[in-house]
């Protein structure tokens, strides 16, 4: 025997109340998706709220880490297939693959007098970090970075206004230099990750036209 009483018909919500509650829940979910989930998970920030809340940078890093993991998995599969298909013979020397380059990045060597900022930081094994420059569309930055104590994986990229671009990527690289031209107004810079077994120190020098520079953990 149950002690609870069955609610009367008058106590139950009406169809209109249920529809209104459902509509409110749907709108709230949509707002959270656009203002919180998209910036925090994918770096997409159509409303600008993610940047104010500090979620957009988090989403960009998550997206970049996921892409890095996919690229490494694809590289491992490709190497495994290449090894399996290679007949037994005297191994031939092969050159290390050159990093990908997009048209927005040139290989111009900057002059020493052009440096405006210099940043040095240490990456522990497995650690990654990002440095961004605030740039207007078409602005140019000269740069040079070197790694002491090992090599790093890196991605030269940009994001802003709901857009993103990857200019250049590389794996197991000890240095890079050139000129970065902003494809659109936003944040443009580099993400580095230390995949080695020892600490490495990265020294970045930048010069040219940009509004500010910051490091994103």
Image (cartoon, helix red, strand yellow):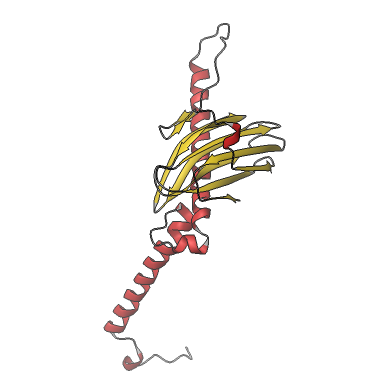
Count of number-bearing discs: 0
Residue lying farthest to the left in this orientation: 16
Report the residue at 45% width, 52% height from top: 42
Query: Does residue 153 appear in this view?
Result: no
Report the residue at 45% width, 64% height from top: 49
Query: Does residue 163 appear in this view?
Result: yes
Residue 84 picture location, percent across and down:
51, 18
Residue 115 picture location, percent across and down:
59, 38
Report the residue at 58% width, 6% height from top: 90
Seen in the image, is 110 located left or right of residue 182?
right
Q: Examine the rendered structure and indicate whether residue 22 appears above or below residue 189.
A: below
Q: Nearer the viewer, residue 111 or 126?
A: 111
Q: Examine the rendered structure and indicate whether residue 41 appears above or below residue 20.
A: above
Report the residue at 52% width, 54% height from top: 57
Residue 71 picture location, percent across and down:
49, 35
Seen in the image, is 8 located left or right of residue 68?
left
Q: Nearer the viewer, residue 108 or 125?
A: 108
Which quadrant of the figure has residue 45?
Answer: bottom left
Residue lying farthest to the top in this orientation: 90
Seen in the image, is 48 located left or right of residue 151?
left
Q: Nearer the viewer, residue 41 or 172?
A: 172
Q: Nearer the viewer, residue 166 or 186?
A: 186
């Amino acid at each position: 025997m149950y002690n609870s009483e069955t609610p009367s018909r008058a106590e139950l919500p009406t169809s209109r109340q249920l529809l209104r509650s459902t509509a409110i829940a749907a709108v709230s979910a949509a707002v959270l998706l656009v203002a919180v989930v998209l910036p925090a998970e994918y770096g997409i920030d159509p409303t600008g709220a993610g940047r104010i809340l500090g979620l957009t940078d988090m989403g960009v890093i998550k997206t970049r880490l996921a892409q890095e993991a996919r690229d490494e998995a694809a590289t491992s599969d490709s190497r495994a297939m290449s090894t399996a298909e290679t007949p037994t013979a005297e191994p031939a020397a092969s050159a290390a693959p050159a990093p990908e380059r997009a048209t927005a990045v040139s290989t111009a060597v900057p002059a020493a007098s052009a440096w405006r900022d210099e940043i040095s930081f240490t990456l522990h094994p497995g650690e990654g970090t990002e440095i961004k420059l605030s740039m207007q569309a078409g602005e140019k930055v000269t740069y040079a970075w070197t790694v002491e104590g090992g090599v790093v994986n890196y991605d030269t990229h940009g994001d802003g206004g709901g857009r993103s671009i990857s200019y250049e990527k590389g794996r197991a690289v000890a240095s890079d230099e050139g000129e970065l031209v902003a494809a659109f107004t936003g944040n443009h810079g580099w993400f580095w990750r230390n995949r080695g077994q020892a600490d490495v120190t990265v020294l970045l020098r930048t010069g040219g036209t940009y509004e500010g520079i910051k490091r994103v953990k």
